[in-house]
Image (tube, helix red, strand yellow):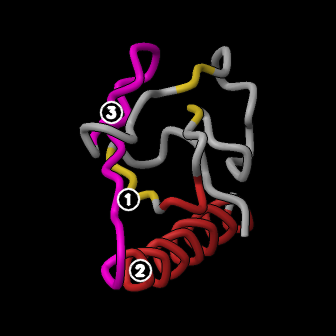
């Protein structure tokens, strides 16, 4: 499911998302700013210098829970955006 770019300022990512870039490939407007690759592997945290989005690397069992929560949040954000667009 596509992720809305710059909709939130913190994203949980998993090892499946590496190498990490901002914007991420699944974000709607992937060209909202130049794609930059963020070194997150060693520290588990990175911040985009363009948009200020913060990324936390979630590993292990927590990664599965984070992916599920992230998918739910993306669905809710997309549904809200579509409802706003439909209402306008």
Please name the residue shown 35% across and 54% down the image: 57
User: Which circle, 3 or 2, is nearer the viewer?
Assistant: 3
Query: Of 4 and 69, which appears nearest the observer?
Result: 69
| Residue 9 % position (x, y) | 34, 42
Query: Which residue does the numbered mark 1 point to in the structure image?
Result: 12
Whole-number angstrom distance, CA of label 3 to CA of label 1: 11 Å
Q: Are marks 1 and 2 in contact (CB under 8 Å)?
A: yes
- Labelled disc at residue 69: 2
Mark 1 surroundings: few (<14), some (14-19) or many (≥20) residues within 10 A: some
CA distance separating discs 3 and 2 = 20 Å
Q: Which of 13 and 75 is in front in this view?
A: 13
Residue at image position (63%, 57%) is 3
Name the residue nearer the viewer: 73 or 88.
73
Circle 3 sits in a helix, a strand or a loop, which is it? Answer: strand
Quadrant occupied by the C terminus:
bottom right
Left or right: 17, with 38 as reference point = right
Q: Where is residue 30 in the image (x, y as percent from the top left)?
A: 73, 35
In the figure, 32 relative to 12: above or below?
A: above
- Asked where in the image residue 59 lies, by quadrant, the reply is bottom left
Distance from the alpha carbon under mark 1 to that under mark 2: 9 Å
Magenta segment boundaries in residue numbering: 45-62
Mark 1 / mark 2, whichever is N-terminal: 1
Image mark for residue 46: 3
Quarter of the image holding residue 49? top left
Is 31 left or right of 20, judged from the image as shown? right
Q: SS class of the residue under badge 1?
A: strand
* Mark positioned earlier in the residue sequence (3 or 2): 3
């Amino acid at each position: 499911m596509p992720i809305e770019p710059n909709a939130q300022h913190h994203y949980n990512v998993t090892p499946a998302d590496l190498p990490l870039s901002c914007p991420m490939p699944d974000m709607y407007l992937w060209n909202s700013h130049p794609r930059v690759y963020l070194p997150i592997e060693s520290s588990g945290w990175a911040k985009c210098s363009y948009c200020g989005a913060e990324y936390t690397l979630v590993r292990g069992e927590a990664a599965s829970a984070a992916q599920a929560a992230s998918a739910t949040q993306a669905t809710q954000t997309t549904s809200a955006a579509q409802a706003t667009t439909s209402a306008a």
